[in-house]
Image: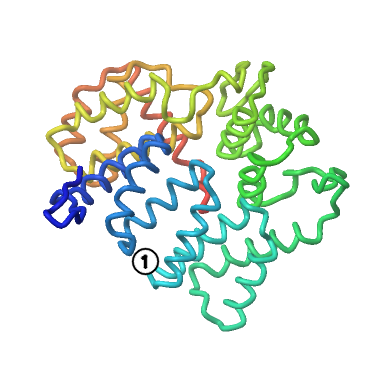
Amino acid sequence: MTNQDEFGKVIAFPGLKDRLFEKGVEALEEGDAHAACDLLSQAYELESLNPEISTALVLALYECKEYEEAQGICREMLLEGVGDYFETVDMYLMILIQLHEHQDVVDTLHALFDEKEVPFEKEEHFRKLLQFSEKMLNAPVDEAGEEAHGSPLLEGKSLEEQIIITAGLVQRNIRPYRQELENSLQDEDMHPFVQTMIVNVLREHGVASEILVKKLGREGFVQPENLPEVFTSDAFREAVLSLEELLLQDSPSLIRHAEEVLKRHAFLLYPFDMEWDPDDIALAYGHYAAGILGDEDLEKDLQEKMDEGESKTILAFIHELEEISSPNI
């Protein structure tokens, strides 16, 4: 992918950086975080001060749980003024939480609030992060350094707090919390986004026992260690392929929007798949996206292709899932 001139200087082929970035983002969107890290790291080596490349690489490293490397790049971005300052601070804080560096979170946020620099749209989010890290600093710990398990881990917490706490369990001993986590998977009042995160935590910890999951009107036993990662199941990939084939002649923004909705819903459903025919799924999601984006001709065309069965059932399910509030983390 590179060449050398007569003086031995390494020269990148024209357009290489852009291709690496595009392929890296594509891999990240498809859920292949490790491939994304590899591609985006190469792009970063070619242009480390590019805000889009740096941000995408931090997100990929975060997904791969390479928190320390992501932390280093975030620090460099803040020092060099690369990218949107407060978006970078937001990523940096979430990484600090994963590393359990709560004092740094508290110090950083107190400094920002004292200087009255926090933008209005970030204020509530940052205050919740501050409160969470202050709680963690004040929580009693046992001899092993774990939180004392005298009170429920998730019960009574806000959705944002539940997400932050659950994400942090990937690198912690979950034995004290196993029963509560399993109970949460059978509690249909628990947000399905958090339930998906809990299933992922159990999968990451290699839990082999069968566990009952109830969510969105479905239930079944799963073995977490044998589950595929989110967005890697055959059913999801086939649905995405059918959607892309269906909308091939339409605008990239419409295809992207339809895929984003499908991806969001697949995450909410996990570990369950959409069990309908991929072509019916594509018709329903294509129709929904066309309606949202105001493409009346396409919406009418797809309506004519939808039969009275599966596609209309799926469309009703789409509207049901869209009523579920999406967490803003």
Q: Position of residue 4 (x, y in %)?
A: 16, 50
* Location of residue 221 (image quadrant): top right
Q: How many marks?
A: 1
Residue at left 12%, top 34%? 249
Q: Position of residue 47 (x, y in %)?
A: 28, 59
* Location of residue 195 (image quadrant): top right
**Colour mapping:** rainbow
SS at badge 1? loop
Instruction: Tell which of 121 and 232 is nearer to you.
Output: 232
Q: Residue furthest bottom?
A: 115
Q: Position of residue 276 (x, y in %)?
A: 38, 17
Name the residue type under label 1. Gly
Q: Residues within 10 Å of mark 1 (few under 14, many from 20)?
A: some
Left-right relation of 197 to 100: left
Left-right relation of 319 to 257: right
Left-right relation of 122 to 311: right
Residue at left 16%, top 42%? 251
When the figure is inspected, residue 211 is found, relative to residue 12, above or below; the finding is above
Mark 1 highlights which residue?
Answer: 83
Q: Position of residue 230 (x, y in %)?
A: 47, 30
Instruction: Tell which of 191 and 174 is nearer to you.
Output: 174
Residue at left 22%, top 28%? 303
Q: Residue furthest front?
A: 7
Instruction: Tell which of 307 and 220 is nearer to you.
Output: 220
Identify the image quadrant of the N terminus.
Answer: top left
* Location of residue 73 (image quadrant): bottom left
Residue at left 52%, top 75%? 118
When the figure is inspected, residue 108 is found, relative to residue 161, above or below; the finding is below
